[in-house]
C-alpha cells in the first residue's frame, strides 16, 4: 500500500492518521526512522492498528503492542451496534486495564 510516513506517505495513511486520535503512549524515536520530516501523527512502529467502521470512517487507533484479538470485541461492536456508545466505552476500559499506561 506504500509508505506510512514521510514524503512518499500514502494518502490512505494520511487519511487514517488525520481522523484518529493519537494513542496516549505513542513514543517516537527519530533515529529509528527512514524519513526526514516528522509529524506528530506519524505511525510509530510496525503493526499499529486502525479500526474503521462499516462506512469507511476511521474510529480508533491502537499501538503495535495491542494484540489484534484484543480489539476483536470492539470491532464487532462497531459493526453490529455502532450506536451503543456505553458498550464501546466499557470495552475500551477493559482494554486500557490490560494495557496500562507506563
Image (cartoon, rainbow, N blue to C red):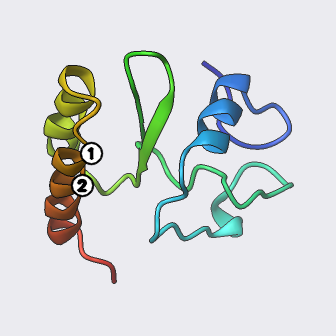
Q: Which mark is residue 32?
A: none
- Quarter where residue 39 is shown: bottom right
Distance CA(mark 2)–CA(mark 1): 6 Å
Residue 85 disc label: 1
The image shows residue 78, relative to residue 45, as above or below, that is: above
Expressed as whole percent of the image width and height from the top left, the position of residue 86 reads: 20, 50
Pointer 2 with pointer 1, Cβ within 8 A: yes
Residue under numbered circle 2: 89
Mark 1 crowdedness (10 Å alpha carbons): few <14, some 14-19, many ≥20:
few
Q: Is residue 18 above or below residue 100?
A: above
Q: Secondary structure at mark 1?
A: helix
So how many labels did they put on this image? 2
With 22 as the anchor, is 86 left or right in this view?
Answer: left
From the image, which quarter does the N terminus lie in? top right
Q: Label 2: state its secondary structure.
A: helix
Residue 54 position within the rendered picture, expressed as x and y whole percent measured from the top left: 37, 16
Observer-nearest of 2 and 91: 91
Between circles 2 and 1, the one closer to the viewer is: 1
In the picture, residue 29 is in which quadrant? bottom right
Image-based side of 32 in relation to 70, left or right: right
- In the foreground, 51 or 29: 51
- Rendered residue at 50%/52% (across/down): 45
Q: Position of residue 40 (x, y in %)?
A: 71, 61
Residue 14 picture quarter = top right
Residue shown at 23% from the left, 66% from the top? 96
Image quarter (top left, top right, bottom left or bottom right) of the C terminus? bottom left
Question: Do we see residue 11 in this rendering?
Answer: yes
Please give left or right for residue 14 compared with residue 19 in the image: right
> Is there any visible trace of residue 48 in the rendered image?
no
Amino acid at each position: 500500500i506504500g509508505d506510512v510516513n514521510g514524503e512518499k506517505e500514502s494518502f490512505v495513511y494520511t487519511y487514517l492518521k488525520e481522523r484518529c486520535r493519537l494513542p496516549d503512549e505513542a513514543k517516537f524515536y527519530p533515529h529509528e526512522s527512514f524519513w526526514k520530516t516528522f509529524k506528530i501523527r506519524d505511525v510509530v512502529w510496525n503493526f499499529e492498528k486502525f479500526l474503521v467502521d462499516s462506512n469507511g470512517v476511521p474510529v480508533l487507533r491502537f499501538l503495535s503492542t495491542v494484540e489484534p484479538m484484543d480489539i476483536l470485541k470492539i470491532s464487532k461492536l462497531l459493526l453490529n451496534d455502532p450506536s451503543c456508545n456505553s458498550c464501546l466505552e466499557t470495552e475500551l476500559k477493559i482494554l486500557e486495564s490490560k494495557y496500562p499506561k507506563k
